[in-house]
Amino acid sequence: MTTQPVTVRQAPDQYAKPLLIALLSGCAVALVLGLYGGLHHPTHYALDIAGFSSPLYAKAWLTTAAVVFAVVQLGTGIRISRPDAPHGIATVHRWSGRIAILLTVPVIIHCLYALGFQTYSIRVLIHSVLGCIFYGAFVAKMLSLVNRETMPKWVIPVLGGVVFVSLAGLWATSALWLFTTKGVHG
Amino acid sequence: MSRQGPLLTLGSVVIVAGLFLYGNAVAAKPGGPPAAAATTPTPTATATSLPAGATSAPAHALFAGRSSGDQVTVAIAINGKKAAADLNAGLASEVSLQGSVSGDLVSLTSSSGTRLTGSVSGPDMFGTVSGFLGQSFPFSAAQAIVQAVYAGRSSNGELTLAVSTDGNQAVAYVCNGHTIEAWLQGSVKGNQVNLTGSKGASLTGSLTGLAMFGMVTPNTGLSLPFSAELSPHPAGVFQARVAINGLATRIGWAVLPDGTQVGVAVIGSTRQPAPLLDLSDGAFTLDGGSFTAAQVAGNATVVSP
């Protein structure tokens, strides 16, 4: 991802610095997660979450719930900056996002701590890469929101889109795969 | 508010992640780290010097050394009351001897009339060889840590097991290839082998000659007598810890010297026959993925303390 092309003669680009910081932070987070997942010796052991038949199903359902909230995110995010946006849509957007991301935290910790960055099949490789991208894009989006009045208009929708698409991809390569191969149960 | 909101969200995610990571680390600690790097590309016996040991001849040991003139290599194996030795002066002039141990004295003879007598003094053995290619000479040898594999079956063949020893430490894997399996760990003291595992699993054996006999209990309620013999490559204990579709998976194989392999894969909490292991490089495939198993040395950790 690159910053806006800037012509040198113009006044100093007010966007450049905060945007650059946000994007580079996101890249750094993605890189660190990937490196940790790749270098940390997988423990093959992690805390179980009560109430599910296996940690795998716990993770699948948490991710599914996160995707449901992410769909709410998409629906509210599209309208949030329209002049005729319904009252309270920003609150719904923020809280659905917070819940969605918090739901993914136990999952990613299990993935990273117990399993790590794996490459043994295409599905697993895609899942590992998307996991890093997802959190990197999330961090970049949060940091660009801090200075959103100084950001170019496209930044937040694009980052939001990356977060949504990568989460959808994560879900498809894990929970959807599990439900279709091992059945839908708790 | 609008400037702090995203940072609060980020911060809370970091805090929750930290809590989970901490919880996992605490929960994982009693089990210790997974058997780390349990790999020694072992030929069945390798030699390194051992610090001072018992004064009488150890019940299970290998001594390696040379003649005083350095022309002849001397290797002596002691197993219980039996001893075997190999003298080698190169150029195909090799002699094998058989004999016995009495206290700290060993006495061996070959069919061609070569005699070896030695006396064990701590980690060393001193003695003389006579009648080897018409010559007599003194020799000295030092005790080596023995890395050995004993592989065999239970009395009716239900269970297959392999025991890997390294000095006075040993690990074992026993399984029936389907649903019963146990990892065991413990010590070799004299000619007694005592190993234990989780859920009441145990193995007690005694080393006699070049074999091990005893009782193995893969889980409470199932105890069977077994015999295993000192076995060369490819016999051994093999292990792989991988993630199969997000499930922690541990696979063990007991491999007999003829290449027969019996193993069980524990995927999550289900057990199934282990995939075929390529004994040349440890490679195997499971559920479409390619992985590598490693031979487990006798000093590895295979049972969580």
Image: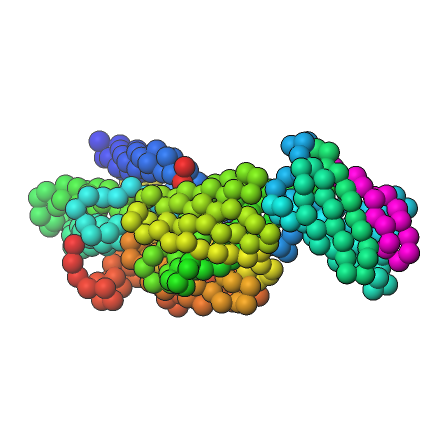
Residue at x 75% of width, y 38% of height: B119
**Quadrant where the N terminus of chain B is found in the figure:** top left
Residue A49 on the magenta segment: no
Closer to the camera in the image, A36 or B166: B166
| Predominant secondary structure, magenta span | strand
For residue B14, which quarter of the picture? top left
Residue A157 visible? The answer is no
Residue A72 visible? The answer is yes
For residue B160, which quarter of the picture? bottom left
Q: In x, y percent, where is residue A153?
A: 29, 50
Does residue B84 appear to the left or right of A164 in the view shown?
right
**Colour scheme used in the picture?**
rainbow
Q: Could you tell me how many numbered marks the image carries?
A: 0
Chain part drawn in magenta: B124-139
Residue at x 56% of width, y 43% of height: B191
Residue at x 63% of width, y 46% of height: B81
- Which residue is at the far left? A87
Q: In x, y percent, where is residue B208?
A: 56, 50
Does residue A129 appear to the left or right of B140 in the view shown?
left
Q: In x, y percent, where is residue A2?
A: 44, 53
Closer to the camera in the image, A90 or B105: B105
**Quadrant where the C terminus of chain B is found in the figure:** top left
The answer to whether residue A171 is above or below residue A90 is below
Residue at x 91% of width, y 56% of height: B134
The answer to whether residue A65 is above or below residue A121 is above
For residue A168, which quarter of the picture? bottom left
Closer to the camera in the image, B7 or B16: B16
